Image (tube, helix red, strand yellow):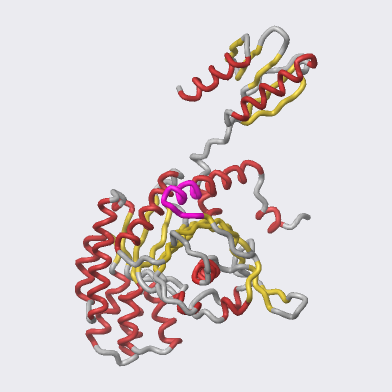
Amino acid sequence: MRNKQLLHSMFYPKQYAKKRHVIHKLTNRFTKFGYQQVETPVFEDYDLYNDVQGTVNTADMLKLIDPSGKVLVLRPDATIPIARHYTHLQEKVTSGRLSYVLDIFRSTLEERSRTQAGVELFGERTPEADAELIALAVTSLKELAIPSFKIEIGHATFYKELLREANLNAMQQKQLDQYIQSKNISEIVPFLKDLDLDASLIEKLRKIPMLYGDASLVIDEAENIISTERMREELDYLSKVYQLLKDYQVDSYISINLGLINHMNYYSGIIFQGFAEGLGQPIMMGGRYDYLSRSFYREMPAIGFAFEVNLLVDLLSGVFTEEEIIELHYEASERQRAFQLAEALRTANYTVIVRTAKEDEQLSDSPGIFVNTEKLVYSKQKEQREFKTEQELLDWYLRKDVE
């Protein structure tokens, strides 16, 4: 019996066509926003991820040892190597806008790998930069015609500031994280009371998981948990981002969730995730990571996100239209002419398969062209058209597609 995991991980032609379609749409959209595509090595030094705190769990990495005895990992994350490469660039770079389509490898994944397509914006920390990036995510999903999706925006500062006040140990914080993520209000209060925290701090922490939903209402309600100047500044910042998203006219796709916790602890400000109806896991994750570059001995603000390409492919089942293939058949005496016509159609961006004609050829669902000495015949199902010259057929094809 064949390995089920191998079968599951293989993309059959129709499925792979969807994947190429998704990647083409995303990369094209990224380019229109000024992002230049880059690539990082598949194999990275283990120390790159081990030395940067708050990243991928080292137990989840796929490791191997090279002939010199050095420990390597299959790339478990794209942001860290891109940030390292960018901060170490010697040449002058005109734009800090980089995009990528890369495979990510982790032992916890069902297929050990997944494809991500994302962007990283270096050198800017403004509400305008954050709003543009979120708007790019929304418009990319719209262009793919992903049905019924939402982008949840959170912010790392509010929860982190309250945790700093609470002064919890690692185990206590991990437990509280779980309660916050699951919005388990009934367990949060007793848990915090057992830690002998101040009543007002307990109340603010209790409110965190309930601060989600309509953006304007959540921003107003968040006023009640402000206890530091940093929280005040970040709430004003978040409010400006939302106003900008309204100007982008994408606010109907936005909700705010201040109980949103991302396991990549290098996020320092706005964080966000994309969700599609009927799917229980995020199709996109991102956020601001202004302090990650310190691990590479530079101070540089940055923000980015990544789409889960394979999940987007699964969501296209009802909306994807396969590219039409033209079958061009020819009589033996017209072979050269048929080859030239096929190449002219390909140059005009059509997909063409060339075959010798067979007797009693039946009409098919796919469009076909028959080349003989007297004429060119186009057929598709019950439709038939005749043309005297190749140019006449090409002109008609171009008009047909425009119409």
The correct choice, above or below, for 275 with respect to 388 in the image is: below
Q: Give the magenta-colored segment's residue range.
A: 26-36
Compared across the picture, whether 291 is left or right of 45 comes to left
Compared across the picture, whether 10 is left or right of 57 comes to right
Q: 128 or 259, which lies in front?
A: 128
Q: Quadrant of the C terminus?
A: top left
Image quarter for residue 337? top right
Q: Quadrant of the N terminus?
A: bottom right
Image quarter for residue 112? bottom right
Q: Position of residue 152 (x, y in %)?
A: 36, 61
Question: Which residue appears farthest toward the front when viewing the image?
Answer: 91
Q: 201 or 60, which lies in front?
A: 60
Magenta residue check for 29: yes
Residue 337 appearing in the image: yes
The correct choice, above or below, for 325 with respect to 186 in the image is: above
Q: Position of residue 329 (x, y in %)?
A: 72, 20
